[in-house]
Amino acid sequence: MTDQPFELPDFYLPYPARLNPHVEEARRHSRQWARTMGMLEGSGIWDEHDLDSHDYALLCAYTHPDCDGPGLSLITDWYVWVFFFDDHFLELFKRTGDREGGRDHLERLAAFMPMDLSEGFPEPANPVEAGLADLWARTVPSRSPQWRERFAETTRNLLNESLWELSNINAHRVPNPVEYIEMRRKVGGAPWSAALVEHAVGAEVPERVAASRPMRVLRDTFSDGVHLRNDLFSYQREVEDEGELSNGVLVLETFLGCTTQEAADSVNDLLTSRLQQFEHTVATELGPLFVEHALDPLSCAGVLAYVKGLQDWQSGGHEWHMRSSRYMNERAAKGRGLGPTSLAGLLGARRIRSFSHVPHQCVGPSLIPDLYMPFAPKLSPHLDAARAHLVVWCHGMGILEAQPGVTGSAVWDEEKLIDYDFPLCAAGIHPDASPEQLDLSSAWLAWGTYGDDYFPVVFGRTRNLPAAKVAVDRLPAFMPIDGHILATPVNALERGLADLWTRTAGPMAPGARRAFRKTIEDMIGSWLWELANQAANHIPDPVDYIEMRRMTFGAELTMSLCRLGHGNVVPQHIYDSGPMRSLENSAMDYAALLNDVFSYQKEIEFEGEVHNVVLVVQSFFDCDYPAALAIVNDLLTSRMRQFQHVAEHELPALYDDAGLDEETRRVLRGYVEELENWVSGILVWHRECRRYDEASLRRHHRPPLPRLGGPTGLGTSAAMITRPGPARSTSPAVPAVSAGTA
């Protein structure tokens, strides 16, 4: 390959690559193994020259430098298998557009990964099945049941999401950047590689921390680093030869409307950002994680060995890409010359910029572009009554007054509550609600937004993260899975949650109650993530920000409430499917990012925040506010168009593949309409409430007037005399409803 579409950029390579001394042993073994499995001559996919030129043994020797000989041979066989699967699927199903045949092929593979080997395997019908059966039997006996489940899941994701790539090729559709990052983790297989790292280093991640945010971020940043690097090297083969549409360079080239070289440079910038997010997580989040979960020294050492294994994979994977005939690397040495721009990047200019934001800059009124909204909004007829009832409820919970003994905790008053107009949002997202349901929706919105406002003021300004952690750790006590609430609320946040939990979760089955509680725990946990970034003055990495924004926005909480009326009609695996998650994530991102567009002045100028997507884009691309806003608006539009694409094309295919009956399809079509109301109602609320316009911001942030009969001055806000509200009481139980927070 000499006519390259772009020059390879200068890569951020913080760790040196090392070569396993058993590489020749692995080469010999994998060649014989592939022939035994039927992957070479006669397969129609590879011959021996193909396998030798790809040199997967070299890949594994670089990415797993410390394995012994048999261990390296086993790991190499896994990679031979996964690359053969990819090329086999390309020839048989992608090139022919045979989606049905591809689905049948993938469904059979799950049977070759039994949790208990005594169950045996079906008779293999092709080299992919034969290879998987052999590898599974050789690998899992030394691994725990938990690891087997995790590895099987990542393998299924790797295999099954190939249908997504096939669907996009058939539709001639280039995904948007957020969709691409999410799906590439599954299709690209790096989470699968991360699980094999555990096997290679002989140290499993303890089950009690495997699902934690730090471990998830390490897996995700590792995955994104592997995939984005591969996209740069494989662009010519995938896009120009295979007609592939799932390549990060092509995705940014299409989304940004830029040249291929500019897109490649932007992909490399994102790759660098993800690797630095990996380092940031290791340095700042692993230690607290070990302490919180009381990991013993051996378990801590195992996690650190896993982290080192992921680092080895990044550096070794790059070295292999530089050498393998599978990729565009002929002028790689030239591409690594240090120009002024690349030198600044390698020295960490972007990393420094992410920590050097000057807070409270005067940015002027938020600019609101023409936002794409294809759905006509609706409004509940019970809006006025809900407005009056919410004021009474907030007084009763103590939300509109200072909290006893907490300086600066009078974050809301009745004027702000009326201006914020949460019932308007509830009336739009749930237009068919009964009066009682609308009251409950409004209260959830108010409670979540109150907490989101309370934490930065009370804990953020003082950098008192330990106190914030204590506050968050207390809240689950007011969400019992079984039985009654035993803890006694001591402030408005706890009092409000106890009331809302009783009214909402009471009618739920235990499983649904547990899932609902997790959405709330994710949201309140994300407040701690925001406080940590605020204390470090750290503008988040773009991918980390968008994914955490779904939690800080409370989107999972409100969408789970939308499902309550579905009963047990829809199987859980349908909600967990790729198309359904894609539908929900695109709606969540649209709503959360439009909030950032409206709240830019509020957060940047008045609150000194670093958590706003416009600021994140400004920092990442080093551009001004209008340019960043245009990029964000394009992303909003693409996420909404993705929502429409999934609803119109991917969900019907999912229903057919799963053989759903008409009643289940009717419920799911209704769910899509509920999400349409959700996003359109949230947009109406942002346009009409008095929370984000400059006049309201100046009114809400004016210094408090002196109060007669009490002290004034710095540090005395908690002692201010406030107007007493109605006596606090628990509202009567009402049915659970859909709600949203913004």
Image (tube, rainbow, N blue to C red):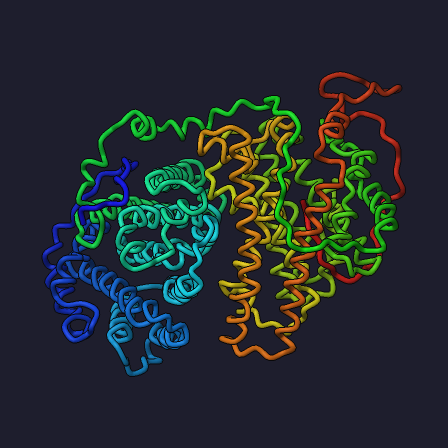
**Quarter of the image holding residue 80?**
bottom left
Residue lying at the far top in this picture: please name it. Answer: 713
x and y percent of residue 344 in the render? 33, 26
Image mark count:
0
Task: Please state which of residues 392 and 178 is positioned toward the viewer in this rendering.
Answer: 178
Which residue shows up at 64% across the image and 25% down it? Answer: 364
From this viewpoint, is residue 235 visible? yes
Q: Is residue 186 left or right of residue 586?
A: left
Which residue shows up at 78% across the image and 61% down it? Answer: 432
Which residue shows up at 65% across the image and 60% down it? Answer: 481
Task: Please state which of residues 468 and 599 is positioned toward the viewer in this rendering.
Answer: 599
**Quarter of the image holding residue 447?**
top right
Quadrant of the rendering where the C terminus is positioned: top right
Q: Against 94, is 680 above or below?
A: above
x and y percent of residue 124 in the render? 28, 80
x and y percent of residue 477 in the render? 66, 51
From this viewpoint, is residue 114 visible? no
Q: Against 610, is 322 above or below?
A: below
Residue lying at the far bottom in this picture: please name it. Answer: 123
Q: Is residue 606 left or right of residue 619?
A: right
Task: Please state which of residues 63 and 206 is positioned toward the viewer in this rendering.
Answer: 63
x and y percent of residue 728 in the render? 85, 45
Q: Is residue 228 left or right of residue 328?
A: right
Which residue shows up at 61% across the image and 35% down it? Answer: 467
